[in-house]
Amino acid sequence: MKKKWINFVIFHHELFDENYTCDPSFDHRCYQFVKCNETFRPVYNSEFGYDVMYEHDFEFYDKTLQARSYYAPSVIYHVYKNRIHERFDYVGFMEYDLSLQCAKAGGPLRITETIDHIINENDAIIVTYRNFHTFGHLAGQEDMPLAGDNWSRTMIRDYNEYFNTHFDPDTFKDCPEKAATQQSFLADRHTFEHLMGFITHVIEDRLAERGDGRTRPCTFLERYFSIALQFEQVKKLQLNLHHTGLGHETGYQYGSGWTAKTVKRICTLVQKSLHPLFQTIR
């Protein structure tokens, strides 16, 4: 019997048709678009056929999470808490700036069809949609401490405490394996529920709010997802979709610490300083 699956595509502001039309096998029935973050109004092509739901319409909805900068992880939490995932054999999540094409040449061209084939050939499995940085690179970021220690050491201790495991807190120091980022992945229902038991604990006990104020909870949650996905004892495949960066004027510019609006403003100032036509005379 054919397995039933869904990808929840999470967006703050805009959706871009080209992220989906690039996949010849794209099927609207496999993608549910979820609007979060009420700071921004939704913008998308109404003629494309997007099936859009709003996070704030969930039966159970903790509005304080968006207010505290949980953003995309808040949507995953609410899908789980409202038991929406139970309608499917496999459940996935993608951010709005991932397109249905592989980041590197030589990958599959028909992404939706590929996902369908993977899940119908496997039982327990995790498919990650974005793998760019190594764990070693991310763990080496000393500018985002959590609970007074390196973020990865703290999170591994949190994981060990919850599951009564004994992973070395320095597991990811200099680790060459690619981390799953942007909380973008697909998993069988049982694995997802096991994973979300831990993530729910992290969110409800505010473990991602123990930083020094420089890093948002959503960024820490992304790393919690990365570690939890890595430690799950199931088969894993990396699809590694293309990260377009479209729409970053509304959110966090991954890895830079700046929003794209700030970057655009800096570029404008540089342009004005170099081009006589843009000189400002005071």
Image (tube, rainbow, N blue to C red):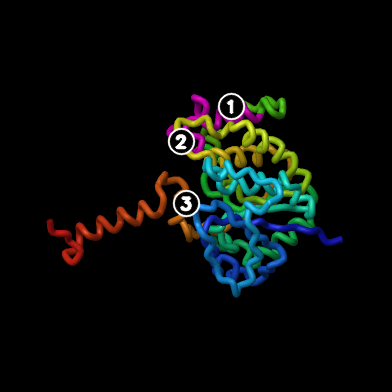
Callout 2: helix, strand or loop?
A: loop
Q: Front-most of 199 and 274?
A: 199
Q: What residue is at 64 percent from the left and 62 percent from the top? A: 52
Which numbered dot is residue 169?
1
Amino acid type for the residue under numbered disc 1: Pro
Of the image marks 3 and 2, the number of the one nearer the N terminus: 2
Q: What residue is at 56 percent from the left and 28 percent from the top? A: 154
Callout 3: helix, strand or loop?
A: loop
**Displayed quadrant of residue 231:** top right
Residue on which disc 2 sits: 141
Q: Quadrant of the C terminus?
A: bottom left
Residue 186 vs residue 13: left or right? Answer: right
Which numbered dot is residue 49?
none
Q: Front-most of 35 and 60?
A: 60
Q: CA distance from mark 1 to mark 2?
A: 15 Å
Within 10 Å of disc 1 (Cα), the crowding (few <14, some 14-19, many 20+) is some
Amino acid type for the residue under numbered disc 3: Gly
Q: Front-most of 166 and 259?
A: 259
x and y percentages locating residue 182 in the rendered image: 56, 48
Of the image marks 3 and 1, the number of the one nearer the N terminus: 1
Q: In this rendering, is residue 213 above or below 13? A: above
Of badges 3 and 2, the one in the foreground is: 3
Within 10 Å of disc 2 (Cα), the crowding (few <14, some 14-19, many 20+) is few
Q: What residue is at 52 percent from the left and 30 percent from the top? A: 210
For the magenta stretch, what is the residue range? 137-159
Residue 99 vs residue 267: left or right? Answer: right
